[in-house]
Amino acid sequence: MSIKGLKVGIVGGSISGCAAATAFLRIGCDVEVFERSSHGLKDRGSGIDIPKPLCAELEDKGYLPQDYSVCEAKVRWWQFPDGSQNGRRLWTQPSPSVANNWGNLWQALRRLVPDRLYHEGKALEAFDETGETVTVRFADGSRREFDLLVGADGYHSAVRQNLHPEAEPEFADYILWRGNYPEAELEDRSLIEALDREAARLVVPFSDGHSILYMIPGSDGSTSPGKRRVNWGVYAPCPRALTLNGIESEPPGSITAEIFKDLQALLAEHFPPAIAELIGHSPREEVSIQPIYDSVVDTYVGNRTMLIGDAGTLTRPHTASGATKALEDALAIERLGSEICDLPELLLRYNSERCGRARTVSEIGRRIGRAQVVDTPDWGNMTTADFEDLIRSILSGERLYLFGDKV
Ligand SMILES: Cc1cc2nc3c(=O)[nH]c(=O)nc-3n(C[C@H](O)[C@H](O)[C@H](O)COP(=O)(O)OP(=O)(O)OC[C@H]3O[C@@H](n4cnc5c(N)ncnc54)[C@H](O)[C@@H]3O)c2cc1C
């Protein structure tokens, strides 16, 4: 069956759904996107990393506009408390990437999908791919037929569940505290200015976790100092007072004062005061908690279905690969779709390229979690050579853009 003219239904209209829609439109398919949420996706205003070369490729290929705004980072400063305001620098890690504001990235991709092809308030409930077409049933009772169904429906993917009923996302036994706020709210900007001078981010490692802090563009795309947002995350054990709701995040507004005490205790015990202040600037009502899960599957494709983005593989946020993976999946679809004329062959090639790479990134994520949260070294006594050895053992012969090319 020729790819051109194929009727493609995409379930999920977030980063991967919109990017996949553009890829399939470019190879001449009839595309429709079905997004469960009815009033647009709610921007959490937080940061999302991608490699700089990927950003350039997306701009070149027209997935992102030429003036697309990002905050570039070159290094990470690993700071350790030593009684001084900023702490002692343990290591300057080469770590090139570009930080996006999630809302800006999604809006740029969403603009490429004509409104008449993007249906809101349409949740997939079930599908059947045993016949000549895929029959999709939506929660409102309507039915549609497609030649190909693309599962871009995220971490809780119904398409993945149907393809792999046995695959259960696995809790990593720790969580990520997240927050972000306008940089303009800060009275003391001295540490931010120091970071800007070297395009640096901050990492604070401690005995059972670590933090990351960096700047992202403002919601209007602004990247000038004073107009960006400060974005942070702290990986740590689950607070004692919190009963997790499975894989679901605890959204802003749901963190009780009792739960929040755990973050405050971490900041007081393990952080240099200036960094504790930057993180502690976020009020409790604006902080969220994301339980860390892994989910990998053996194949991304069925007879007439394919998975993309988080629906395919859920990797730990340490790898900064959520959007990267989704966007690379979409680029692979466009490239393969313009080389290959036959749907079974396209599915085969897509699966072999993308499913294996996602599994590799997932493994790297597990190793980062082990080394930087679960079974941490004696950070305060580490030398540059020790850090490089640690990263080499995490990578285990593979590559991840965030670690640069020095190890
Ligand atoms: C509103 C929103 C805000 C986000 N903000 C951030 C952020 O600030 N920082 C960050 O690191 N990551 C964020 N993420 C996650 C990030 O987008 C993903 O990890 C990554 O980009 C991969 O995207 P994805 O499109 O595969 O999955 P997701 O972004 O999770 O999108 C999945 C989409 O599928 C839809 N969907 C799910 N089930 C169905 C169904 N049955 N029928 C129809 N549609 C369905 C969901 O509503 C969602 O829009 C956010 C996700 C969403 C949905």
Image (cartoon, rainbow, N blue to C red):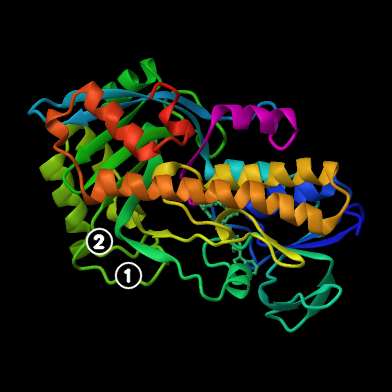
Asked which quadrant contains residue 40, the reply is: bottom right
45 magenta-colored: yes
Q: Residues within 10 Å of mark 2 (few under 14, many from 20)?
A: many
Q: Report the number of numbered marks.
A: 2
Residues at discs 2 and 1 in contact (Cβ within 8 Å): yes
Where ligand 1 lies, by image quadrant? bottom right
**Residue 160: x percent and y percent?**
60, 68
In the image, 88: left or right of 149? left
Where does the image place residue 112, in percent across and percent down from the top left? 76, 44
Q: Is mark 1 within 8 Å of ligand 1?
A: no
What residue type is disc 1 on?
Leu
Q: CA distance from mark 2 to mark 1?
A: 8 Å
**Label drawn at residue 402:** none
Earlier-in-chain disc, 2 versus 1? 2
Q: Quadrant of residue 118?
A: bottom right
Please give the range of residues in magenta. Answer: 44-64
In the current view of this chain or complex, which residue is farthest to the left? 83
- Residue 135 versus residue 193: which sits nearer the camera? 135
Q: Which residue is located at x 66 percent, y 26 percent?
A: 67
Residue occupied by mark 2: 238
Does 54 appear in magenta?
yes
Q: Where residue 133 sits: x, y (%)?
A: 84, 72
Between residues 93 and 176, which one lies in front from this camera angle?
93
Q: Is residue 302 above or below residue 79?
A: below
User: Residue at 30% of width from left, 31% of height from top?
Assistant: 202
Which residue is disc 1 drawn over?
244
x 80%, y 59%: residue: 344
- Quarter placement of the C terminus: top left
Secondary structure beneath disc 1?
A: loop
Q: Please state if 314 lies on the left or on the right of 151 as rendered.
A: left
Looking at this rendering, what residue extends furthest in the bottom direction? 141
Q: Would you say 8 lies left or right of 40 here? A: right
